[in-house]
Amino acid sequence: GNETVISGGGTHRIFGAYSIVDAKLEGLTLTEGKCDIGSVLYLESSENILIKGVKITGNESDSQILVCNYSKVAIEGSRISNNTGRGIGIDGNAQVEIVGSVFESNIINSGGGAIATVNSSVVTIEGSEFIGNESKDTDGGALYLDGSSTYTITGSRFEGNKANWNGGAIYHSGSSVLIDGCEFISNEARYDNGGAIYVYRYSGTIICDSST
């Protein structure tokens, strides 16, 4: 079918939602959003939000999607790529489920080229790919995990992600993390430690099983 493209025109956020329940974005291409946070979607205090088969590309923000304040969102079969700034920021007791999605070539100066999570959130990632994401100045080329959050990452691939300092693929501090059946290929921590995974010394827990 025809592709539906929604643009922020290089000057505006595309979607914002507060206290929304049961909403779905499906089969869209979202591009040229630009603002400080949440260039594509700012989601606060909202539940049962589904993002399915969506392409998010060519946007500019600290986080293209920001999920905060107890929001609950599922992302399925989507591609978040070639953005200036990370793909998703997760904050404030949010719950995010990511299945069968691709995060590629998202570049940010701060932590987490693909995803950054803080402040007691719960994140599940299944069967997804993180390719060529970059933290140019700090830690966590793909994932930056901080602040007592809980992560479960299964059957996913991390390839060619880069951090300037620690954790080419994953930087982990203070969260609970389970990694099962994942691949880590050619990730790089340029000037410090953990080409694939860096665990800060005061971290919570991390369990790796059946991963290479």
Image (tube, rainbow, N blue to C red):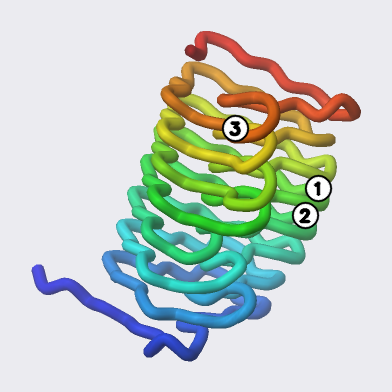
Comparing 55 with 188, the one in front is: 188
Residue annotated with mark 1: 120
Residue 151 in sight in this render: no
Q: Residue at x 58, y 11 (%)?
A: 209
Q: At label 2, which amino acid type do we have?
A: Asn
Q: Residue 2, how many percent across, how many down?
A: 11, 73
- Mark found first going from the N terminus, 3 or 1: 1
Comparing 47 with 121, the one in front is: 121
Q: Residue 92, how many percent across, how many down?
A: 78, 59
- Mark found first going from the N terminus, 1 or 2: 2
Q: Is residue 95 above or below residue 62?
A: above
Circle 3 or circle 1, nearest the eye: 3
| CB contact under 8 Å: marks 2 and 3 | no
Measured in 3D between alpha carbons, the distance from the residue under mark 3 to the one under mark 1, in whole angstroms, is 26 Å
Measured in 3D between alpha carbons, the distance from the residue under mark 2 to the one under mark 3, in whole angstroms, is 29 Å
| CB contact under 8 Å: marks 1 and 2 | yes
Total number of numbered discs in the rendering: 3
Q: Residue at x 42, y 29 (%)?
A: 157
Crowding at mark 1 (Cα within 10 Å: few <14, some 14-19, many 20+): many
Residue annotated with mark 3: 189
- Mark found first going from the N terminus, 2 or 3: 2
Measured in 3D between alpha carbons, the distance from the residue under mark 1 to the one under mark 2, in whole angstroms, is 5 Å
Q: Examine the image and state in which quarter residue 4 appears.
A: bottom left
Q: At label 1, which amino acid type do we have?
A: Ser
